[in-house]
Amino acid sequence: QYTANAQTPGGTSLEVELWLQANKVQSAVPADGSNISLWQDQSSKGINFVQNGTNLVPRIKYGGMNYQPSVEFYTDVESGNASSAERARKLVGASTMAISTSKSYYSFFVSSMDETQSSAYATVLNYGGDTENNDGWRNTTDNKAIWMESVSGGSNIHSTGVQKTYGIGAVVRPNTTGSTNLVRLYHNGKINTNTMSRGVLTNGSNTPYIGKSNSSTENYFFGEIHEIIVLSAPTNGTY
């Protein structure tokens, strides 16, 4: 029986909803290049991610960005378009993720995107409940950015000014339709300069995804994920 890590990321006092680390992907250390059909949650929620039916899965890669382990969503195509099967590569929550309208959400992900293969909106984490509940990357010729989307209150909001396909993405999502607090996006510490809409996630217990926004190929992501953290705090009108 797998036991979640009792620590919290950075010693935070906020509630840890999800904590995935590529250097702790499984209790037994997998060999470099091994398929990853199980990514164990280090939080007390125990939302492990597993293979979605017969869909392809990512692999572990040692020596990724900053020489750190990563979970790689890859293609064997050197140039041109990846196959539909490769675009459907993903992991799915083995259990549901509870989203509450009484909580605000703070997500962080360390990742690098393959801009030659990823879709224009590339999902790192989908919270479930709808294909529009995403954190990930914006991927166009003139805009390489952190991206978020919510099913209600605002969609396709992305950061500006950094133009890098790697680094740390952070999304502050008040998860309310009030007019006081707006979504904030950070790309490598730089706050988004766009006008930011409010974003409300789908309430309830929903099945999350990594690498896609649903069970097919929508918002497909190619690249590496080193860590995903989702924190929450009571919605109280402040950040």
Image (cartoon, helix red, strand yellow):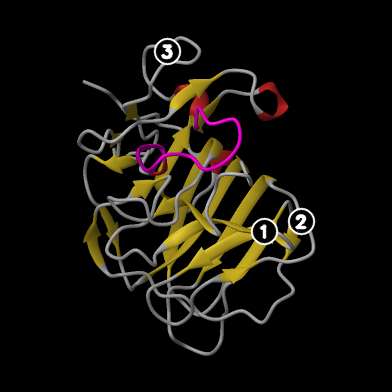
Q: Which residues are magenta?
A: 74-86
Helix, strand or loop at disc 1?
strand
Pinpoint residue 28: horizontal percent, then vertical percent: 37, 12
Pinpoint residue 151: horizontal percent, then vertical percent: 37, 74
Q: CA distance from mark 1 to mark 2?
A: 6 Å
Q: Mark 1 Cα within 10 Å, few/some/many (few <14, many 20+)?
A: many
Q: Is residue 33 above or below residue 141?
A: above
Q: CA distance from mark 2 to mark 3?
A: 33 Å
Q: Residue furthest right?
A: 161
The residue under the point 46% across, 62% down is: 105
Q: Are marks 1 and 2 in contact (CB under 8 Å)?
A: yes
Front position in the image: 149 or 84: 84
Pinpoint residue 72: horizontal percent, then vertical percent: 51, 30
Q: Quadrant of residue 171?
A: bottom right
Q: Is residue 57 visible?
A: yes
Front position in the image: 222 or 101: 222
